[in-house]
Image (cartoon, rainbow, N blue to C red):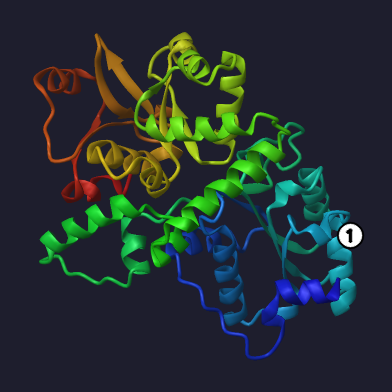
Amino acid sequence: MQKLFYTFNPWWDEGYVFEIRKREKYLKKIFKNMDSKDIILLAGLIRVGKSSIMKLVINELIKKGIDKTRILFVSLDDFLLNDKSIFGIIDEYRLLHKIKMEEKIYLFLDEITYKDKWQQQLKNMYDRDNVKIIASSSSSSIFIDENAYLTGRNRVIEVKPLDFDEWLDFKEIKLKIVDFDLMKAYFDDYLQDGGMPEYVIKKDRVYIQNLVEQLIYKDIIAKHNIKMKSVIQDLFLLLMERSGKQLSINNIGNILKITSSNAKRYIEYFEDTFLIGLIKKYGKTNEKITSQSKLYTGDIGIRNAYTGYRDKGSVFENYVYIKIKEKNPYYYVENGIELDFITDRYFGEQYLIECKYNSELNDKQRELFDKINVKNKIILNGYKDLHLIENI
């Protein structure tokens, strides 16, 4: 166990240098909550950068003078930890460094949902120990707390793929405002690459293929004990093809020759991994429940790797969805005329957003856009209007 601890925590040894590209906006969100006892939960797609962000936080803590041995990082999906509870791991860590119960420690628990009853274990640790906990998961089940163990004790932060500004940082591209034409060209490159950090650096399609295979086999097929592997693979390709479109569960079932209930269940598995997002039609409760959902991918680069980089308007719309998804957006339809997004009024100020890419609203869209009684209305036409969504 001692060897495994040192493997996970190389900063315990002298001379270790952190070589991780910064993601400042997440560091700011996390350190805003570091002085409270609240548990910070990071959620997001596999390999989107959650572990790297945790290590960036560790680096900052060490810079601030926190004793290195008072900081523990463990990846709970490691095979060698299968038979260990979270409590058991922490007890062995305290024993290794002779840390008393009253001494504060910082715990970074990667892939927390691999442990049974993790919410209860974190609650008990929160209540009894002098501890700051930051945990992560690649499953949206991190949001589900049926027994309310962590209610009032946690803060959830979704880690998304790199946005355009972060992509420029990772590419080490520095441009001035006067370089507008270059910025526009780079944004087009970004829409093709997407925002998976390692892929942005390596630009190796095999990396994306391996990521998707890991997600399909480990987080869907193996986790849910699915026998029809080819169906899940075919469903993945269908979902990528239908990004930006309304999704008919019955049609998916017919194409794959499975029941609609199985199609619905399998799609939910993909949604649980953050690979796709679904939004409902705006309207009364019964309309939201009965309407077809609209589908978006969790990263536009993954979509492009399998569908090709085409329909830039749809890719741009998907980018905007990722930017505003925490505002719980819906799509808006009236008399067959559709507008892209209207945000939930219970998530702050309400916004009506229409995405265009080098095109304009047609007359009927313009009439509907002007008619809807929403204070904040935004038309996004490619790169030049990106600043309009930064402060939503």
Decide which of 219, 337 is in the foreground and name it: 219
Residue 171 occupies which quadrant of the picture? bottom left
Q: Position of residue 72 (x, y in %)?
A: 73, 69
Q: Which residue is mark 1?
A: 88
Q: Residue at x 76, y 40 (%)?
A: 149
Q: Residue at x 52, y 21 (%)?
A: 256
Decide which of 56, 99 is in the foreground and name it: 56
Left or right: 77 in relation to 378: right
Q: Position of residue 390 (x, y in %)?
A: 30, 49
Left or right: 261 in relation to 224: left
Residue 67 occupies which quadrant of the picture? bottom right
Tell me: residue 338, above or below residue 296: above
Q: Secondary structure at mark 1?
A: helix
Tell me: residue 58, above or below residue 239: below
- The quarter of the rendered structure image containing the N terminus is bottom right
Q: Position of residue 290 (x, y in %)?
A: 47, 11
The answer to whether residue 347 of the structure is visible from this angle is no
Q: Residue at x 54, y 35 (%)?
A: 233
Which amino acid, by three-letter code, is at mark 1?
A: Gly
Left or right: 42 in relation to 198: right
Q: Residue at x 53, y 17 (%)?
A: 253
Tell me: residue 208, above or below residue 323: below
